[in-house]
Image (cartoon, rainbow, N blue to C red):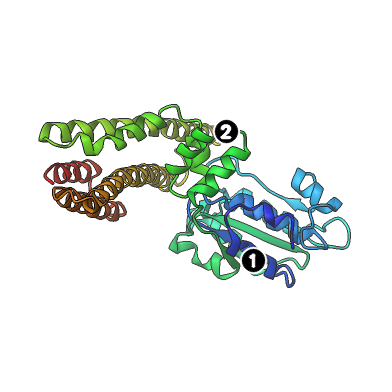
């Protein structure tokens, strides 16, 4: 058993797959999974195990130095901006062709390989590196989701897929990191299976107020005016929650603009692709907010359904109507949640849902 891989919380299938792969290492692996499923942490633990003669015992010098970030044969290159540049990708090729210290191999962890912008020169340059691997170098790549245009990179790797983390697993991670049980539970319940998102939410001062807005929905949609106000309040709260991400993207883009100016370029290279990626990240954040909110509303209606069912067993005939309404509400919320991946206007989706809930 690998003590190192045991540190990867809530991923028993992925851990089992990685342990099976340790016996016959290949030149490249891809660790992928839903946004926030700790792919980078998994990659570093797997890389540590690859460098250990005992498959990640956790006690030897290779394991200790790898986990501490001081193993000369475990390389984790970083990028200067939001995306991998061609120069940075070419440096990966140079690293791959260097001789590792000692008789063994070296492992290069390339985080967020999906940020090579599809069919851009950076992706093409990296594909060449994977197609002509160095005999003593192993690549461990990570990505949330590889876009279709990067499918050739996936085809050169053995892929290990992580699963979304359960709420209880995320809560345990946050508590182990020193957060209180209540804050950890709130963040985990709103994280939509993402430990990365949970780590942001646990420090989000507005999280509890947003959850409270969602929990209050069943009580605040009895009239058209209440439904409209409840929807608008939630939309405004989500806008406020998104603001730090937008600000960080603006800062990162300002760095790219400064670099372009220094190089006397007319503008930021691949500006449209970068802006599209930023919008995609914002959209993902908002979708996660809505998914978490819908889950909260569903829980409230499930509690109503449970209470109505208990009342029915005690002979309360009026409870039948309450149970039907709660069941119908759960179905309405489920349908709305199923439309999150479409291009439907969020405001329209929320207003329609709340009006429909109020009519029950």
Q: How far apart in space, not on screen, are marks 2 and 1 (Cα)?
A: 29 Å
Label 1: state its secondary structure: helix
**Label annotation for residue 16:** 1
| Residue beneath the point at 46% across and 35% down | 249
- Is 272 or 288 nearer to us in this picture? 288
Q: Give the residue drawn at x 82%, y 58%.
A: 99
- Does residue 96 appear in the picture of this structure? yes
In this picture, residue 244 sits left or right of residue 51: left
Which quarter of the rendered picture does the N terminus lie within?
Answer: bottom right
Kindly tell me whether residue 97 is visible in this rendering: no
Q: Secondary structure at mark 2?
A: loop
- For image coordinates 64% across by 66% down, the residue present is 16
Q: Which mark is residue 319?
A: none
Q: Could you classify mark 2 by the number of other residues whose Cα lies within 10 Å: few (under 14), some (14-19), or many (20 or more)?
A: some
Q: Earlier in the sequence, mark 2 or mark 1?
A: 1
Q: Residue drawn at (46%, 30%), measured in percent from left and top?
A: 204
Question: Is 225 positioned to the left or the right of 166 in the image?
Answer: left
Observer-nearest of 139 and 262: 139
What residue sits right under mark 2 in the picture?
Answer: 179
Is residue 128 toward the left or the right of residue 134 in the image? left
> Vertical placement of 48 versus 248: above or below?
below
Q: Nearer the viewer, mark 2 or mark 1?
A: 2
321 lies above or below 119? above
Q: Nearer the viewer, residue 192 or 316?
A: 316
């Amino acid at each position: 058993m690998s003590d190192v891989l045991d540190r990867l919380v809530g991923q028993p299938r992925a851990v089992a797959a990685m342990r099976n792969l340790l016996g016959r290492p290949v030149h490249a692996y891809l660790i992928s999974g839903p946004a926030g499923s700790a792919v980078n942490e998994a990659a570093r633990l797997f890389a540590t195990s690859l460098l250990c003669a005992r498959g990640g015992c956790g006690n030897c010098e290779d394991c200790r130095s790898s986990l501490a970030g001081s193993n000369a044969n475990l390389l984790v290159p970083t990028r200067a901006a939001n995306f991998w540049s061609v120069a940075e990708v070419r440096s990966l090729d140079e690293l791959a062709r260097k001789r590792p210290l000692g008789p063994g191999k070296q492992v290069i962890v390339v985080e967020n390989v999906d940020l090579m912008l599809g069919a851009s020169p950076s992706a093409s340059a990296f594909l060449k590196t994977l197609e002509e691997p160095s005999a003593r170098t192993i690549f461990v790549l990570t990505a949330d989701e590889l876009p279709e245009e990067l499918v050739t990179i996936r085809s050169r790797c053995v892929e290990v897929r992580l699963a979304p983390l359960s709420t209880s697993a995320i809560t345990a991670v946050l508590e182990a990191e020193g957060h209180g049980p209540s804050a950890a539970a709130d963040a985990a319940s709103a994280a939509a299976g993402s430990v990365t998102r949970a780590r942001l939410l646990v420090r989000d001062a507005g999280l509890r107020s947003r959850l409270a807005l969602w929990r209050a929905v069943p009580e605040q949609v009895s009239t058209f005016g209440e439904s409209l106000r409840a929807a608008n309040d939630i939309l405004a709260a989500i806008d406020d929650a998104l603001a730090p991400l937008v600000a960080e993207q603006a800062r990162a883009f300002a760095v790219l603009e400064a670099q372009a100016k220094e190089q006397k370029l007319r503008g930021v290279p691949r500006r449209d692709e970068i802006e599209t990626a930023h919008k995609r990240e914002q959209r993902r954040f908002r979708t996660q907010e809505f998914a978490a909110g819908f889950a909260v509303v569903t829980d409230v209606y499930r509690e109503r359904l449970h209470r109505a069912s208990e009342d029915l067993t005690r002979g309360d005939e009026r409870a039948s109507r309450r149970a039907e309404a709660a069941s119908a509400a759960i179905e309405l919320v489920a349908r709305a949640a199923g439309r999150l991946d479409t291009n439907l206007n969020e405001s329209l989706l929320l207003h329609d849902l709340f009006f429909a809930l109020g009519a029950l």
